Amino acid sequence: MSHNAGSRAVVLGGSIAGLFAARVLADAYDEVLIVDRDVLVGTKGIRRFCPQSQQANGLQARGVHAMEELFPGITQELVDNGAPKGDLAGTCRWYTQGYRLKQHHAGLPALGVLRPVLEWHIRERVQAIPNVSFVEQHDILGLETTADKSRITGARVQAHGKKTEEVLEADLVVDATGRGSRTPVWLEQLGYAKPEEERKKIDLVYVTQHYKLRPGCDPFGKDTAINQIAHPGLPRGNVFFKVDGGLLELTTYGLLGDHPTTDQNELYEWIRSLGAKDVYDVLRYADPVDAPIAFRFPTTLRRHYQKLDRFPEGLLVTGDAVTCFNPVYAQGMTVAALCALTMRQHLHSGAGPIPLDYFQDLAKDAIDQAWEMTNTIDLTFPGVKGDRTRQVRMAQKFLKKTQIAATRDGKVAAAYFKVAALMATPDSLMRPGILLRVLVKSMFGPSKESLRPHVWQAPADVEPVFTAAADVRKAA
């Protein structure tokens, strides 16, 4: 069976990267179809084929701005729905190398929103676009091409429970199928070169659990998150933040074989082993509302499409299908939004995008900075294999100085987080004012204040106890 349209784009994959892509495609094509294996429309909870939905997911400040640009008013919509909003540098408590960074408001929006909730709000916005439709519960089988294989003309799909294939004809196909993208294989089958792949084995496992604070208890105070960054001396860390529904979402992680467990009692002990004790102290006044869930992420991955010299017309790739970052740095969804903004620049009325030009801009405008930053940090761990060039080693030394200075100087901390949030380039830390602060303040080592534990005074009538593992299973 064949579907025809005068001007149609087909998006393979209906997760966040696919939704962002569909939003910009809807302005350039008469019809946009989003194909996915899952049930999408109306789904508010965990999707079967999106297991990372159970884990903590975050948008960096640049991602919040990009999302707002694509869907005006959605940030306030999420806040009105109960998502706490803070400042990445001002209301988040950050620890690195065991010391606390100075807090300083930097205008970096940080939203505490559960991944399924965020995805539902974005999907509702996309679904409201008149020329966008969802093709649900369909497997993606391959691509259709012209006889000379120079242009992609559609996608072959198959509905669940049916034996016959369908061809969705398209002027443009966008692969947003994530890490498992088949585009490299399809390219090879069509006689094109596969993109060079860059991988780093980090052997990461992270475990997520949700909690509810007991009445009268709020160890967070005015803060919205308590985050600890793993480092070579202790390859363990966490993100712990307030989210919608009055819940706390805790994801703790370990790299290079040092992994957290899903056993409740052992997980409490794991949390206790972290450098700062804030998270462990909070858990004494909170009760789990579900069981711990683990997720394994063995390697980072970047497909260098921008290095190819031949590519079929009528096909683009976006999101995790191009680059999968170490998820603890929360870059993936933000880069997916930046991919969509880059794609929009290449959509012209009456003419299709030129893929190789798109991939060049995608690398430059959406991927390079995030990849280089996370790559530099990953390579601080001796067990991660990679090329530690002189440039990388210098960047690592300067990063350490910056973090030490940030324990003493809020302006340094704010500048650092603007780079981490992709709102500024690493070069911004080299501006004379900030550079001088980094060099001078780092000379004295971490501030004494940053080494003192954060103390919260609990109400006298609240007993600091942990919920037993059996009670957690019952709640789950």
Image (cartoon, grey):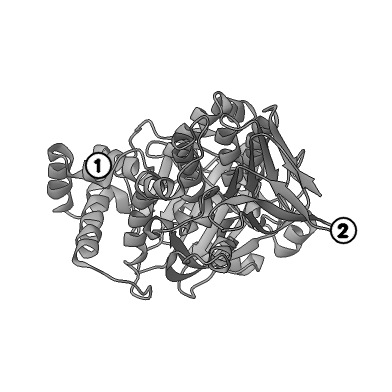
Name the amino acid, label 2: Gly
Instruction: Please tell me how many numbered marks the rendered image carries.
Output: 2
Left or right: 119 in relation to 380: right
Circle 1 residue = 412
Q: Nearer the viewer, mark 1 or mark 2?
A: 2
Residue 64 lies, in percent from the top left, at 48, 35
Q: Residues within 10 Å of mark 2 (few under 14, many from 20)?
A: few
Q: Nearer the viewer, residue 79 or 30?
A: 30
Q: Are marks 1 and 2 in contact (CB under 8 Å)?
A: no
Q: Is residue 465 above or below residue 263?
A: above
Report helix, strand or loop for mark 1: helix
Residue 463 in view here? no
User: Measuring 38% from the left and 45% from the top, which residue is drawn there?
Assistant: 361
Q: Residues within 10 Å of mark 1 (few under 14, many from 20)?
A: many
Q: Name the quadrant of the C terminus.
A: bottom right
Residue 45 in view here? yes
Q: CA distance from mark 1 to mark 2?
A: 57 Å
Residue 201 lies, in percent from the top left, at 45, 72
Q: Nearer the viewer, residue 111 or 442?
A: 111
* Residue 230 circle label: none
User: Measuring 46% from the left and 37% from the top, which residue is drawn there?
Assistant: 341
Residue 419 lies, in percent from the top left, at 32, 44
Res. 74 image quadrant:
top right
User: Measuring 81% from the left and 50% from the top, which residue is drawn there?
Assistant: 1
Left or right: 175 in relation to 346: right
Residue 5 lies, in percent from the top left, at 70, 36
Residue furthest front in the image: 147
* Residue 161 circle label: 2
- Which of the two labelled residues, at mark 1 and mark 2, occupies the earlier sequence position? 2
Name the amino acid, label 1: Val
